[in-house]
Image (cartoon, rainbow, N blue to C red):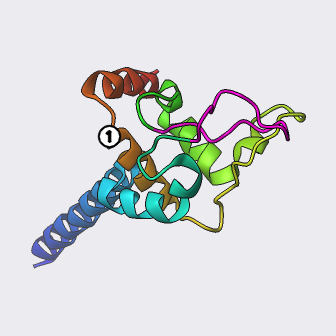
Amino acid sequence: MLNRRSATFAVAALAVSGVAVWLTLTDRAGDPVLGAKVYAAHCAECHGANLEGEPAWQTRKPNGELPAPPQDASGHTWHHPDAQLFAITKHGMARFAPPDYKTAMPAFIGKLSDHEIRAVIAYIKSTWPEDIRKRQDSLNRD
């Protein structure tokens, strides 16, 4: 009886561990459907409803800030690994830029959960052509 109980406990522990691993991997990968909703509510105002960014996004505004860049394949977002995109979204660009760098990119810590940030990244990536996704994925492996 003790062996059966131990075996049952071991199976249950493995099942719980498997679910925990699955949830971690799922959260890490992000949910593009949720991401589209979060993007529309929190990002589209600056980065555009169609991820197109602000006009002349590579030319500084009179106040010295760069306009919000596109998040589609025409921008440079895909040149960065997911961890960097996550950190910039969570903590804001100012945390990673030189002290004199002017940006309107806010920190979303306390406004969006880590799960929501990963979902937004997954949504953005889901809009890129396959060749761009592969190139950006190689940055994640490095």
Q: Residue at x 52, y 59 (%)?
A: 114
> x, y percentage for residue 51?
45, 44
> x, y percentage for residue 71?
48, 39
* Quadrant in the rendering for residue 67: top right
Q: Depth check: 27 or 41 in front?
A: 41
Q: Residue at x 32, y 40 (%)?
A: 127
* Quadrant in the rendering for residue 42: bottom right
User: Does the magenta portion include 60?
Assistant: yes
Residue 50: tell me if it is visible: yes
Judge from the rendering whether residue 6 lies leftward or rightward of residue 104; answer left or right. left
Residue at the extreme right: 100
> x, y percentage for residue 66?
72, 36
Badge 1 crowding class, 10 Å Cα cut-off, few under 14, some 14 to 19, many 20 or more, is: some
For residue 6, above or below residue 90? below
Residue 115: tell me if it is visible: no
For residue 40, above or below residue 91? below
**Which contiguous range is marked in magenta?**
54-71
* Quadrant in the rendering for residue 16: bottom left
Judge from the rendering whether residue 140 lies leftward or rightward of residue 33; answer left or right. right
| Quadrant, the N terminus | bottom left
For residue 16, above or below residue 1? above
The residue at which mark 1 appears reads as 127
Q: Amino acid at mark 1?
A: Thr
Q: Depth check: 123 or 139 in front?
A: 123
For residue 33, above or below residue 101? below
User: Does the magenta portion include 35?
Assistant: no
Determine the main secondary structure of the stretch shown in magenta.
loop
Q: Residue at x 37, y 47 (%)?
A: 122
Q: Residue at x 76, y 31 (%)?
A: 60
> x, y percentage for residue 129?
28, 29
Judge from the rendering whether residue 29 lies leftward or rightward of residue 57; answer left or right. left
Secondary structure of the residue carrying numbered label 1? loop
